[in-house]
Image: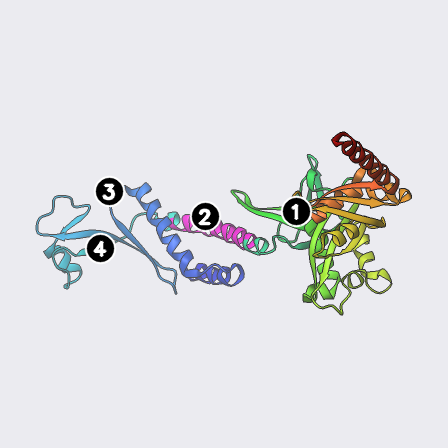
Amino acid sequence: MNKDFILALDSVEKEKGIKKDELIDAIEAAIASSYKKNYGSSHEIKINIDRETGEINVHALKEVVEEVFDPNIEITLDDAKQIYDGYQLGDVAEIEIKPKNFGRIAAQNAKQLVVQRIKEAERNIIFDQFSEREDEIINGVIQRKEKNNIYVDLGKTEGILMPNEQVSGEDYSQNKRIKVYVLEVKKTTKGPQIMVSRTHPGLVKRLFENEVPEIYDGAVTIKSISREAGSRTKIAVSAVESNIDPVGSCVGPKGIRVQNIVDELNGEKIDIIKWSDDPREYIASSLSPAKVLRVDVNELERSALVIVDDYQLSLAIGKEGQNARLAAKLTGWKIDIKSKSQSENMEEIDQIASDLLDDLDL
């Protein structure tokens, strides 16, 4: 240990944010532990490192007593006063010792501990930085693929894009730049583990916040999102003030804002819905692009019967039921869709049944 080592600790403090005093305290403890392993554990010792010169002093700690039974941990008052005249019975005297080859052992321990602490500090810094960015979008570069997991270079560390967080058919070529949503940051023995996603609805939400100033400023709020990644997303928005068009704000001039988001999502379709506290109006809008004739709601069961023109039925339901499924997720209502002719047939049957019951009563 020397002054150069102390200067090196100063550099570590500036570059890594690890306090020099904390490092030296830890080095002193490590050297004390190493001493006991090499020179016997019966001694009580104190290690002191000079903060300016790096000089190491080793002191044996012994209790000042009238009669010594264990010379490893006790010292008479007369012997103690030869070291320092102020010692009294019951005090702990510090007697300097100079163990053979101790400098080499001390230096080795110090180096190992500093390297270990630097690694720990770097891991903690990365964990703190990324844990603050949970539920945010971050830019990265695809590094490699292993066992169906995609590893994304995020700068100081890498994120893991697991198979269920990957969009089917999306290109994950090496060195491709990509935006990912930070799902979770975990502490592990190997350092922080950053779990990221391309399928999470939060990705769409953050893209709209970044692209639409009115959402970023709070003039327009995102009420709900339902998404089937890679295919279609529905997003319900509302304006704080009546003079603001929430849908128009999200679409942008000539559709540029929503188009930028669609491009980032590789052509995923996006339906922007105006949110309403009237469930009939909200459910009708949620089935866009289909046009709805009527919505009958059951508040108690949170279910709705939606009537559309016959030629709009397939559009309202969507391919493999996707449009209806996303509308139900968006609104939180169970939605049953019928065509106008189906509805009329049902009404006719209901009327016949009602008439029959009336006749039976007679």
The answer for how far apart the CA atoms under marks 4 and 3 are is 15 Å
Tag 2, which secondary structure?
helix
Report the amino acid beneath label 2: Gln
The circle drawn on residue 267 is none
Disc 1 to disc 3: CB gap under 8 Å: no
* Callout in the foreground (4, 3): 3
Residue identified by numbered label 1: 196
Q: Where does the image place residue 81, in percent across and percent down from the top left?
A: 13, 60
Q: Mark 2 or mark 4: which comes first in sequence?
A: 4
State the image quarter where residue 85 is shown.
bottom left
Disc 2 to disc 4: CB gap under 8 Å: no
The answer to whether residue 254 is left or right of residue 228 is right
Residue identified by numbered label 3: 42
The answer for how far apart the CA atoms under marks 1 and 4 are is 57 Å
The circle drawn on residue 112 is 2
Q: Where does the image place residue 327, in percent across and percent down from the top left?
A: 75, 46
Disc 1 to disc 4: CB gap under 8 Å: no
Is 262 or 190 nearer to us in this picture?
262
Residue identified by numbered label 4: 95
Tag 1, which secondary structure?
strand
State yes or no: residue 124 in magenta. yes
* Callout in the foreground (1, 3): 1
Report the amino acid beneath label 3: Ser
The answer for how far apart the CA atoms under marks 1 and 3 are is 53 Å
